[in-house]
Image (tube, rainbow, N blue to C red):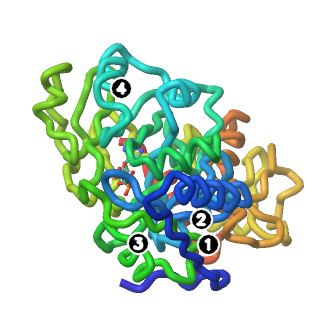
Amino acid sequence: MTAPPLTRVIETRVIEAGATAAGAAAAAADAARTLAAGGLVAFPTETVYGLGADATSGAAVARLYEAKGRPSFNPLIAHVADTGAARALARFTPDAEQLAAAFWPGPLTLVLPRLPVCPVAELATAGLDTIAVRVPSHPLARAVLSAFGRPVVAPSANRSGHVSPTSAQHVLADLTGRIELVVDGGRTPMGLESTIVACLDGALLLRPGALPRAEIERLVALGEPPQGVTASSDADDVPIAPGQLASHYAPRARLRLDADSVDAGEALLAFGATPPRGAAGAALVLNLSPRGDLIEAAANLFSHLRALDAAGVATIAVMPVPHQGLGEAINDRLQRAAAPRP
Ligand code: TXA
Ligand code: MG
């Protein structure tokens, strides 16, 4: 599988964390600095290596999708240092409280209602009203998260379509030249992704993983996943789309794609410097990237769609977005958002 070309080639540094506390602290400080500068950092967790980015920065998250070569914006898991930090992102149902108390830190991801004050970029949750949250137990992951002090989104640190990496060598084989830093902490102990449980109305197993189902069922009843729920262990390229979970963000307004003109009363989602015919009569105009930068456009995609939708227009005209690089994922999301409602 060929990943789209990168906008630039990056020098990938490797830092060996070593076995000492001082080594781990130095690696964590380097990782935190790199994340704060908008960089991409691969680090070990107890499950697999994650590819981390500052979850609160839309631009950093857009770069992450670009580095992975994902053809679509699947929602990402926000990693935090402790349950207290998770409470700033999501609302905990009683089931979620029980599971977090029993299994965090550890290989369990909870999909929860996203709080209105949640600072995670909309691109990271692909515009959904839910958010996946996890508190990893690996000492290096914990050190990175504590040093950074903000949520870190981290999909498995492999190119899209490849298997999840369990060593720094695997990460380098896939991502050299695409990310800033790899924190080498040796092999990951579990080698299998976290188990994902949605705690919304009831509890649902969305992805089997390193925490066995039976352990979870000792504490909470797991509902049967509705038809169409994927239960793949490398769900990387397969969005989880159960019936009662929104599979993707859908605006209320109709989307008119590839618009080369705007009708009076329509809202306009623009791209690039040249306004289309009729733009002056638009109810509201937001530009994904006036300078035509696809990373900036990806970072703005969901928030701009939401803002235009909130204006109450019947139709949002969308200017064409080039198909190269992140444009493929942007167009994928626009097409889904434009699809007729079931
Ligand atoms: O063990 C793991 O979970 C690793 C380590 C690095 O933490 N991470 C990982 O992330 O496996 P990733 O991106 O490869 O898989 C995350 C899965 C995807 O299938 C995604 O669709 C799903 O979680 N997901 C994320 N947010 C979701 C949400 N709000 N609703 C439903 N599914 C969600
Ligand atoms: Mg993955």
List the residue tagged with mark 1: 180
User: Where 136 sits versus 318, above or below?
Assistant: above
In primary-sequence order, the first of circles 3 and 4 is 4
Q: Which quadrant does the N terminus fall into?
A: bottom left
List the residue tagged with mark 2: 40
Residue 270 percent coordinates (x, y): 75, 61
User: Where 318 sits versus 304, above or below?
Assistant: below
Nearer the observer, 49 or 129:
49
* Mark-to-mark CA distance, 3 and 2: 14 Å
* Mark-to-mark CA distance, 1 and 4: 32 Å
List the residue tagged with mark 4: 100
Give, as a three-letter code, the residue at label 4: Ala
Tell me whether circle 1 and circle 4 mark residues in contact (CB < 8 Å).
Answer: no
In primary-sequence order, the first of circles 1 and 3 is 3
User: Where 23 sits versus 230, above or below?
Assistant: below
List the residue tagged with mark 3: 168
Q: Which quadrant does the C terminus fall into?
A: top left
Give, as a three-letter code, the residue at label 2: Leu
Give, as a three-letter code, the residue at label 1: Glu
